[in-house]
Amino acid sequence: MRDDARYSLDTTAFKLFQGVKAGCFFGVKNYIPYMSLTDKISDLITRGESETLEFKSSFGKDVIETAVAFANTRGGRIVVGVSDAGRSAGKSFGKESLRDYVNRIAVATEPSIIPDAEKYLTPAGEIIVLSITEFPLKPVATRGRCYRRSGSTTRQMTPPEIAEMHLHSTGQSMDAVIVAGKSRDDLDLDAVRNYMRRATAQGRRTFSGQDDPWQVLKKLELVKSESEITRAAILLFGKNPQSPLTQAVVHAGRLREKVHIMDNRIIEGSIIEQVEETVEFIKRNLHVRFEITGEPQRKEIWDYPLTALREAAINAICHRDYGDTADIQIKIFEEALQIWSPGFLPFNMTVEDLFNPEHTSKPRNKLVAQIFYDIGLIERYGSGIRRILDACHEADLPEPLFENFSGGFRIKFMLPARVSEKVSAEDVPLNEGINGALNGALNGALNGALNQQVLDAISRVPGIQRKELVEKLNVSERTVDRCIAELVSGGKIDRRGSKKTGGYWAL
């Protein structure tokens, strides 16, 4: 960090997380005099903006949008009077500023957000801290638009995200939606009886041969009546789940040299059936060798541990966004295997949360997840990632790459020779055919190489600017912008500081 930047942080010291908790009107706190930052707060400001902290030089509509994003995500604090780079804007706020800001946010949001507001005096000027808590009933909107936080940025939500967030905040899930035009006749009750036998054998349910499968579906809330059939019931036990849910398929393929499609299949049927058929397709397209261990049966050594691949396939099928029209895509290359499913991680969950053994499981499709658990496809909520990691460690393979990617969630398994490659031509859509695979693969290879060069440059030279990247890589500004956008989408970098006053990208 430059000396002048560090000096600005020191002279803009302010108290963020403490203050008077009484004598407020509409969330407005008493005036707080200048106080030195603790080491903890100073370190926070030095690291800059985050998912729960935003700097604004002045109050405007972008402050209201950020407040909405905080309310829709994990809550947070907006510091008005400080630039994106963490420097004081030298502001002086009037007596009515706090009340005015709180009122403007409350009036412009639906449901109304009423933040706590505090004013602080610093050696370089005054600042106002607006504290927003996560709203219990989501989504919150302003001017008909909903926003959420993604890292240190505020972005507008898509219609599917809005629908999913609302259902999640009311304790419902996307798979509980009633499918229009479906009835009892569209369900395979023999498949339900098979589920009952498997669940009983697992010891997770107790069904007798006399139990009526239709009544079982009602108790499990998979159906409401003979003409009210949930999406989960169609996916799990439908005679033809792909009508009308055409997206409920797994598109799997094996590619050689990232160009030639060697094997390709659309896996349909119920999602319970899809699990086994998907694993069988993957096995058919992997290498396997045998070790003689002295045991009666020789040991099979696959390219990747089948336990990990099976778990990844189950996660993709169980937790995907079935409101998205895209297929699950599995791509098998000579040096890598990736499984991509539509839909980012559920709201308020990050990739880092997956590695925390204490993280709370938040299944997107609660009804589907319960059935998968009953029949043993899911061992315990939230434990799948750990089993994948353990299996790869035991097989002496690198840890897979887990990331929100291109509107969905991707798990990428890599062989040791490809550990250093994080982004490659494996982003080629399978359903574009051979010509599409050729063009897409070549473009993907170039894009992946450039993305890695940009990432390496940012890693070696913290604070490097776009102009420097253009000169260093000898490419256009548009190309650099596209690479940066893909790296941001993949969660590899985020923005620090202001675009107007010399901000920069950082890991």
Image (cartoon, rainbow, N blue to C red):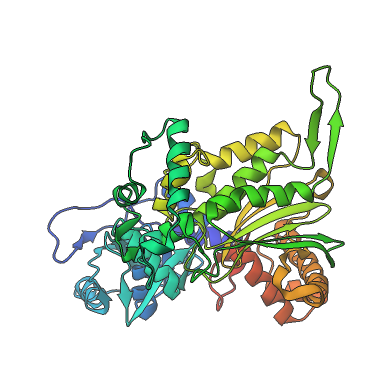
Front residue of 286 and 60? 286
Q: Residue at x 81, y 67 (%)?
A: 445
Answer above or below: position of 498 versus 46.
Answer: below
Where's the C terminus, which quadrant? Answer: bottom right
Which of the 4 image quadrants contains residue 231? bottom left
Please state if 62 lies on the left or on the right of 121 as rendered.
Answer: right
Please state if 80 lies on the left or on the right of 291 as rendered.
Answer: left
Q: Position of residue 172 (x, y in %)?
A: 32, 58
Front residue of 34 and 148? 148
Answer above or below: position of 269 versus 390.
Answer: below
Front residue of 113 and 184? 184
Answer above or below: position of 477 versus 381.
Answer: below
Where's the N terminus, which quadrant? Answer: bottom right
Asked whether residue 226 is in view, the answer is: yes
Q: Position of residue 417 (x, y in %)?
A: 84, 47
Q: Residue furthest top?
A: 294
Q: How many numbered badges does the structure rendering display? A: 0
Please state if 116 lies on the left or on the right of 329 as rendered.
Answer: left
Asked whether residue 134 is in view, the answer is: no
Which of the 4 image quadrants contains residue 267? bottom right
Q: Position of residue 423 (x, y in %)?
A: 73, 60
Q: Residue at x 77, y 76 (%)?
A: 436
Which of the 4 image quadrants contains residue 469? bottom right
Q: Residue at x 27, y 63 (%)?
A: 137
Q: Position of residue 498 (x, y in %)?
A: 53, 73
